[in-house]
Amino acid sequence: MKKRTSTPPSLSPAPSRKNLHSLSASPREIPCSAFTGISCASINPVRSISPASSLSTSTNTSACLIHIPDGSIRGDYDAYCASYEQAIRAAGGIDLQLLGIGRNGHIGFNEPTSSLASRMRLKVLSRETLDDNSKFFGPGEEGPRCAITMGIGTILEARKILLLATGASKAAAIAKSIEGPITCAVSASALQLHPDVTFVLDEPAAAQLAERDYYHRVLQMTALLTPDRL
């Protein structure tokens, strides 16, 4: 992470941030004042929900500058999204884009068939995503059906991208994203176009990768020859 005066990281919704801690062998607390965060997506509309079902995490806002898309806005979405993109440019762009991935291969909330050149916008959530998000809401509580999300084109402008995934439910999407064709049917496959992407996976999430042995060899040789890249 860089100082606040330099370009910021971008954060994905809360489940992926939890994965960051679960995949870390020795989690460390990073001073919040050391960086500026720009969230890549927010559900819309935001309703009043219980703390146990909230998709957001608490932070010391007095020490931490975090920009989160306003999930409470109604109307004039294009103007709002354009202003958010302008805020990213004004901050100097994104240093590190932290992403999760949906079971259908979406990144941010760029559902299948999203344009690979898409920008920040209001996006209707797929049935699969609605079902996956239902666990964050109480019994009988309807989750939001839309989200405000960075587009794939916006995400690809980040200098570095880190995608985190755990569990067997993500294995098919991970395999398609890394080894499949670049297609709007799997939004994360667009990451193949970026020069600096790292996937951080547990064994179940990596289980369907055809070239797993080769990737292990690449890691071994990278550690030996160019350790500064790890």
Image (cartoon, rainbow, N blue to C red):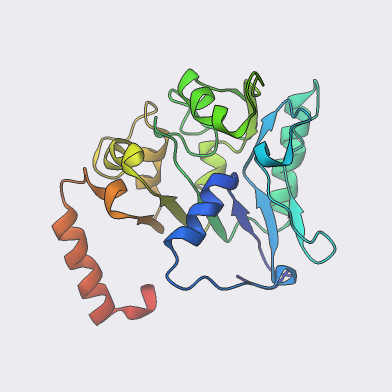
Which image quarter: residue 145? top right
Left or right of 146 on screen, residue 64: right
Left or right of 40 on screen, residue 190: left
Which image quarter: residue 92? bottom right
Which residue appears at 47% of the width and 73% of the height? 26
Query: Which of these two is toward me, 201 or 116?
Result: 201
Query: Which of these two is toward me, 113 or 216?
Result: 216
Query: Which of these two is toward me, 23 or 42?
Result: 23
Quadrant location, the C terminus: bottom left
Q: Is residue 203 above or below residue 221?
A: above
Left or right of 193 on screen, residue 134: right
Which residue appears at 38% of the width and 49% of the height? 166
Which residue appears at 59% of the width and 44% of the height? 13
Q: Position of residue 200 (x, y in %)?
A: 38, 57
Q: Position of residue 194 (x, y in %)?
A: 41, 51
Residue 122 visible in the displayed image:
no
Q: Is residue 91 above or below residue 112?
A: below
